[in-house]
Image: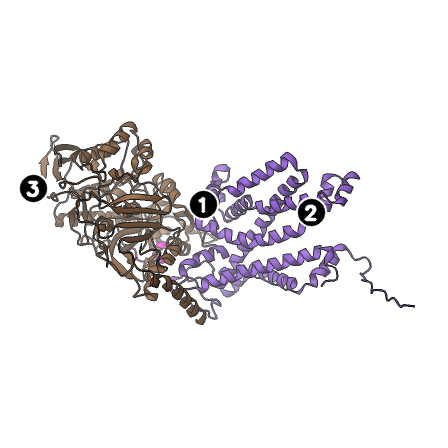
Chain colours: A brown, B purple
């Protein structure tokens, strides 16, 4: 005890010294991060890490704030059925569709001074609709089957169906810069390599947000500076530096030493356990921003593996995992257990769905019903002599995930499942394992189901990454269920809250029965920052970087 | 008339072999003997990890989140770690892997390095240039990307079944091979430098003129005379390799948890430095003590092999 206290005292004393002496630079904010981007293109290979970066400089058309309200970011008025800017129409084929009118804010400029116009929306839509390109952003422009330019700032989109996310639209690309590149490189592979986002990301014309990506050093830092062409409120903080570290321990030490001013809490930053420890040790030295989150940590189940095609096996696996212990003990209750893809704080969460509380006895029963019986070494075999051996793949270097994987491995052994953990570097994980679906059994990662995002991105049969769709989509499980596709279609077309709630209940019920993923827990939206950072809206449901110009160091 | 007193002769036992003399010299080095004893006891304890585990009735890999970070007790002599596993057992099991990786990789590194260094130093000329430029290339390669490339080699694509390729034995051997492939350069340079200085001494030239082959000169004259710096380099390698293994674990190519090694226990403890600093101290102390002990034993061996050390101990 004495040794531990002395050790901790020395750590705190040496860490507090430099930070106490340093005066905060009110014009700069250094944000520590993990996982440098594999490419800067805003609409290709979109994941949580990329969204934490791109939104400083390239704003989406719309975004959800912390009150779960959809806001216009680049548009003048949010189109709704109520205000008439969105209409349900009869299409020539007899089906119901929608028209949505989007008008850009006046005087909106790209960073090089070229106006942002309807041509940019039309160009982005054209690229998104090209099957050889395959953007993977969450609110795809390819949801529109047609686009008509009304004037320099207004477009009318035609949607082939009635969808609830009709007024959620993501980033657009600069036609004057990316147009010629797309014309010369018509496939995704070629285009991504030649895109200015990857060959010259500091070109100001690529960005239209409050900041410009002005400098970067691969693997080390990205620097954003205030965009002089931004028409919105001038950023209070002139420079934001994203400073990358190899691991969360280094990130934490840099925060304690004052080398960084803010860090996200997993994913992409320090772990929730580290935040909890830090909050215990240094309650007053930092501000701990916490809010409910929609980012789900889950285990994707590969449906190509015959061992996992049996539903009872998948259900047994989930019964075998003590998620409550993880949530309570490892995360101090701050990462609540996930019973599905919606948090129980979500207004559309269906409390009647079956849940899979920890029950190893039930897991063993289900496995027995599925034909698996323990052999002499304690591992289940079936009547063909196959062992119930599965691989669990996750990212190397992520301490929390590695811990969770080991806990799950230990718990699986109790129900006669032989789980082998494989930790791979991030690039290999995102590339071979996820996009090419080379994991053989189970894969642990996170996915954010923010309000504007349809569950189709991970549960729809058309979201399975394949060679012929440019490997776009986050349905890494390869799950294809006509019932789920129908339920998702119903949800996407629901426009009023009551219908939406019913449709969400259908999706959640099918999910809970089929278990195409094993839901583990939800990450809170959390950041740790220096106390002088004000107006830091970390509770927004879309990335908080969209409002970075409001941040201020007092 | 003056009285001349003869020096007391050093009496060696009749028929004593050179090895028994060397052992005698080693035995008379108390620090080396204590270190050797420590290493033997540590190795024995690690080898007995299985029976100890059975006697304690605890599985060293079994996680129980409800008993994490427990203080030392009669059940868990060094307490429990972040996943509720017994720390003492994990140190013992970890020692098996770490010591094995350290010793085996050091031996292979030494064989590769000495072979290349001695050939380069003895033959000289163009072959020396080629071998040393090759050595320089290996030194110049950036280590982390090189480790990633080597670690990404899929063993199942070179003939092994997927199960064999991911088995603990394959992972262990992969680590040893990767380390050996990148870590031989220092020993090669030391061996080359030593060989070049010894090959030109008179007795070696005389042996050559008398018809001794190159192999004879190398094994009889050169190797014993360059053993001292090589032994020092090898003993320094052991600790470095143990920590090298933890770097590989961090990148995803090392021993996969839950299998403990001192290196990966140390790496894992980085995140726990605020909540449980002793989890870093225990493997750190063992690595430190092992490295020191190996160094002292190496120093003892060096002294024992050096004929000029007679009478000093």
Viewer can see residue B68: no
- CA separation, marks 1 and 3? 64 Å
In the image, residue B249 lies at what x, y percent? 46, 50
In the image, residue A221 lies at what x, y percent? 35, 47
Q: Are marks 2 and 1 in contact (CB under 8 Å)?
A: no
- CA separation, marks 3 and 2? 91 Å
Viewer can see residue A177: yes
The residue furthest right is: B1
Q: Which residue is mark 1?
A: A385
Range of magenta residues: A356-364
Q: Earlier in the sequence, mark 1 or mark 3?
A: 3
Query: What residue is drawn where x is 72% and y is 60%?
Result: B25
Which type of secondary structure does the marked residue at label 2 adopt? helix
Instruction: Decide if residue A190 is on the left or right side of residue A71.
Output: right
Q: Which tag is nearer the camera, tag 3 or tag 2?
A: 2
Q: Which residue is mark 3?
A: A84
- CA separation, marks 2 and 1? 55 Å
| Image mark for residue B169 | none
| Image mark for residue B223 | 2
Which type of secondary structure does the marked residue at label 3 adopt? loop
What is the chain identity of the residue bearing mark 2?
B
Give above or below for A275 relative to A491. below
């Amino acid at each position: 005890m004495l040794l531990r206290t002395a050790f901790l005292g020395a750590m705190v004393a040496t860490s507090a010294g430099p930070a106490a002496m340093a005066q905060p630079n009110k014009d700069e904010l250094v944000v520590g991060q993990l996982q440098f981007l594999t490419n800067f293109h805003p609409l290709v290979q979109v994941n949580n890490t990329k969204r934490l970066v791109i939104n400083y400089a390239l704003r989406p058309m719309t975004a959800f704030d912390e009150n779960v309200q959809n806001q216009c970011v680049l548009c003048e008025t949010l189109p709704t059925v109520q205000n008439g800017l969105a209409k349900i129409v009869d299409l020539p084929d007899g089906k119901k569709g929608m028209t949505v009118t989007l008008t850009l804010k006046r005087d909106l400029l790209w960073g090089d001074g070229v106006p942002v116009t309807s041509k940019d929306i039309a160009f982005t839509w054209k690229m998104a609709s090209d099957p050889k390109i395959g953007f993977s952003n969450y609110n795809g422009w390819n949801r529109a089957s047609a686009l008509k330019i009304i004037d320099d700032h207004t477009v009318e989109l035609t949607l082939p169906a009635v969808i609830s996310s009709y007024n959620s639209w993501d980033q657009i690309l600069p036609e004057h810069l990316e147009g010629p590149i797309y014309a010369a490189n018509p496939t995704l592979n070629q285009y991504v390599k030649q895109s200015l986002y990857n060959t010259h990301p500091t070109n100001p014309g690529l960005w239209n947000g409050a900041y410009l990506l002005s400098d970067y050093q691969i693997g080390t830092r990205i620097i954003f500076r205030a965009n002089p062409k931004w028409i919105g409120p001038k950023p209070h903080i002139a420079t934001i530096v994203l400073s990358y570290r190899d691991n969360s321990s280094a990130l934490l030490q840099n925060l304690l030493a004052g080398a960084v001013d803010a860090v996200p809490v997993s994913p992409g930053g320090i772990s929730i356990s580290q935040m909890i420890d830090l909050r215990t040790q240094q309650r007053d030295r930092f501000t701990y921003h916490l809010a409910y989150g929609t980012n789900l940590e889950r285990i994707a189940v590969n449906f190509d593996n015959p061992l996992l095609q049996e539903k009872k096996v998948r259900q047994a696996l989930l019964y075998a995992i003590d998620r409550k212990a993880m949530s309570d003990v490892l995360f101090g209750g701050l990462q609540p257990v996930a019973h599905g893809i919606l948090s129980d704080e979500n207004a559309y969460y269906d409390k009647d769905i079956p849940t899979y509380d920890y029950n190893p006895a039930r897991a063993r029963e289900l496995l027995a019903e599925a034909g698996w019986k323990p052999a002499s070494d304690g591992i289940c075999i079936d009547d063909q002599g196959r062992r119930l051996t599965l691989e669990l793949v996750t990212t190397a270097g992520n301490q929390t995930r590695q811990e969770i994987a080991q806990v799950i491995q230990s718990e699986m052994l109790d129900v006669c499942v032989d789980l082998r953990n494989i930790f791979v570097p991030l690039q290999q994980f995102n590339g071979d394992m996820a996009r090419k679906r080379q994991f053989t059994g189970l894969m642990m990662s996170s996915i954010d189901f923010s309000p504007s995002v349809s569950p189709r991105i991970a549960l729809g049969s058309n979201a399975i990454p394949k060679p012929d769709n440019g490997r776009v989509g986050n349905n890494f499980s390869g799950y294809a269920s006509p019932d789920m596709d129908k339920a998702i279609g119903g949800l996407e077309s629901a426009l009023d809250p009551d219908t939406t709630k019913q449709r969400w209940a259908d999706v959640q019920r099918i999910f809970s029965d089929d278990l195409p993923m094993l839901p583990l827990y939800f990450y809170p939206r959390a950041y740790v920052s220096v106390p002088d950072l004000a107006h830091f809206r970390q509770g927004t449901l879309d990335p908080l970087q969209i409002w970075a110009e409001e941040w201020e160091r007092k | 008339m003056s009285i001349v007193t003869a020096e007391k002769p050093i009496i060696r036992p009749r028929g004593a072999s050179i090895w028994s003399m060397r052992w005698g010299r080693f035995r008379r080095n108390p620090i080396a003997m204590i270190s050797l004893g420590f290493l033997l006891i540590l190795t024995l304890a690690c080898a007995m990890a299985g029976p100890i585990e059975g006697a304690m009735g605890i599985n060293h890999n079994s996680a129980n989140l409800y008993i994490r970070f427990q203080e030392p007790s009669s059940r868990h002599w060094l307490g429990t770690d972040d996943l509720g596993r017994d720390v003492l057992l994990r140190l013992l099991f970890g020692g098996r892997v770490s010591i094995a990786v350290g010793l085996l990789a050091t031996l292979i590194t030494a064989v590769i390095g000495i072979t290349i260094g001695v050939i380069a130093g003895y033959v000289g000329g163009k072959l020396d240039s080629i071998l040393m430029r090759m050595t320089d290339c290996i030194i110049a390669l950036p280590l982390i990307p090189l480790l990633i490339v080597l670690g990404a080699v899929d063993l199942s694509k070179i003939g092994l079944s997927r199960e064999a390729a991911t088995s603990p034995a394959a992972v262990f051997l992969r680590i040893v091979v990767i380390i050996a492939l990148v870590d031989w350069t220092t020993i090669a340079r030391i061996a080359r430098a030593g060989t070049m200085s010894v090959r030109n001494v008179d007795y070696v030239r005389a042996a050559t003129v008398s018809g001794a082959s190159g192999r004879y000169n190398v094994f009889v004259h050169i190797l014993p005379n360059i053993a001292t710096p090589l032994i020092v380099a090898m003993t320094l390698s052991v600790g470095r390799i143990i920590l090298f293994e933890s770097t590989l674990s961090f990148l995803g190519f090392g021993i996969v948890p839950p299998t403990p090694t001192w290196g990966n226990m140390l790496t894992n403890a980085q995140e726990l430095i605020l909540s449980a600093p002793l989890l870093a101290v225990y493997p750190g102390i063992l690595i430190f003590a092992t490295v020191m002990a190996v160094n002292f034993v190496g120093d003892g061996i060096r002294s024992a092999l050096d004929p000029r050390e007679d009478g000093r101990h």
